[in-house]
Image (cartoon, rainbow, N blue to C red):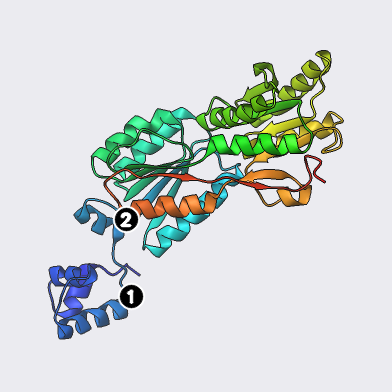
Amino acid sequence: MARATINDVATSAGVSTATVSRLLNGLNVSSGTADRIWKAVAELDYTPNALTRGVFAGRSSTIGVIIRDLDSPYYLELMRGIEEAATAHDSLVMFANTFSRVDREWAHVQKMDEQRVRGLILTTGPDSDARARRMAAAGTPCVIVGRAADLSPNLHSISLDNIKAGQLIGGHLLACGRSSIAVITMGNREQGILRIRGLRSVLNEHDIELPDSAVRAVEAKEEVFTAIAELLADARANGSPIDAVVCMSDLLTRHIYEALHKLGRRVPDDVGLIAVGDFDWAETLGMTVIAQPTYEMGLEAATLIVTAPQEPVRIVQEPRLIVRRSCGEE
């Protein structure tokens, strides 16, 4: 059966397509005419064409979201918050996964712009900022989530207080008697750099050094085992065995845990482990973590899209320490 069109509705109701369009877009139509149109809509099972609406409006009702890697639990909660706010404001969500590839970031941003999305939420690196800034300048609200950015009209950011996250890690490890610390972080991302800065600030207050040799930046989870093995071997050779490992990216936490296990290091008896980012199985493993309010960040990002404030908004969320037992807590 062919899908009913707005012409079919207009013919059945005995009105023009312009009158049908006025009613469907919430404009005033006389009560008698409206009754006839709604009756025709019901009888024909007519569904308005959102694409056509978008053409006439100059923009669709879809919110575009570009994420880095679906393997990370961080993005699942973020997506849930975005979807919740979008649904409440009668919008759909279009997700695109870049698999941490810059070329895909650029391509996805371009495609979202071509689709004339209602707004764009990015969790990508700074390589995509220039294109997002152009979209914002053209009137499309954009929100960068996960890091601070240079803002401009229609371009907003929502991030974690990453320095405080690092400070919470340092304070907790010291409270647990851990002082020979190694760090695994994901690439050269700003978030990890700031977290390490916060961690070092606390350690320095207690005359404890975190040398560059105790920090490993990996580009993929497949590199974690080698990084952990090297850190443990180097520390042993220097006569200062590692008693705690810090994971600065929740995408890597499981792989660090597995690497320590394969290398014969028990958590927390031999080495403590603390990570940024909470997830479902963390409680089962007794993982102490720095939690990010990712669901709330998703809600706020989508809300900024639909409310579309022109003046740039910068939101910084507070991290929260969740103490379990992976650092040898009493």
Residue 106: % across, % down: 39, 32
The local secondary structure at tag 2 comes to helix
289 vs 232: above or below: below
- Please tell me which residue lies in front, 243 or 91: 243
Disc 2: which residue: 307
**Residue 54 showing in the rendered view:** yes
- Amino acid at dot 2: Thr
The structure residue drawn at horizontal position 19% and vertical position 55%, both measured from the top left corner, is 56
Residue 112: % across, % down: 35, 42
The structure residue drawn at horizontal position 57% and vertical position 26%, both measured from the top left corner, is 187
**Residue 61 showing in the rendered view:** no
Label annotation for residue 244 = none
Q: Callout 1: 10 Å neighbours few (<14), some, many (20+)? A: few
Disc 1: which residue: 45
The structure residue drawn at horizontal position 76% and vertical position 28%, both measured from the top left corner, is 179
Residue 157: % across, % down: 40, 41
Is 8 placed left or right of 322 in the picture? Answer: left
Is 72 placed left or right of 262 in the picture? Answer: left
Q: Residue most toward the bottom?
A: 32
Position of the N terminus, as image quadrant, is bottom left
The local secondary structure at tag 1 comes to loop
Quadrant housing residue 2? bottom left
- Please tell me which residue lies in front, 123 or 273: 273
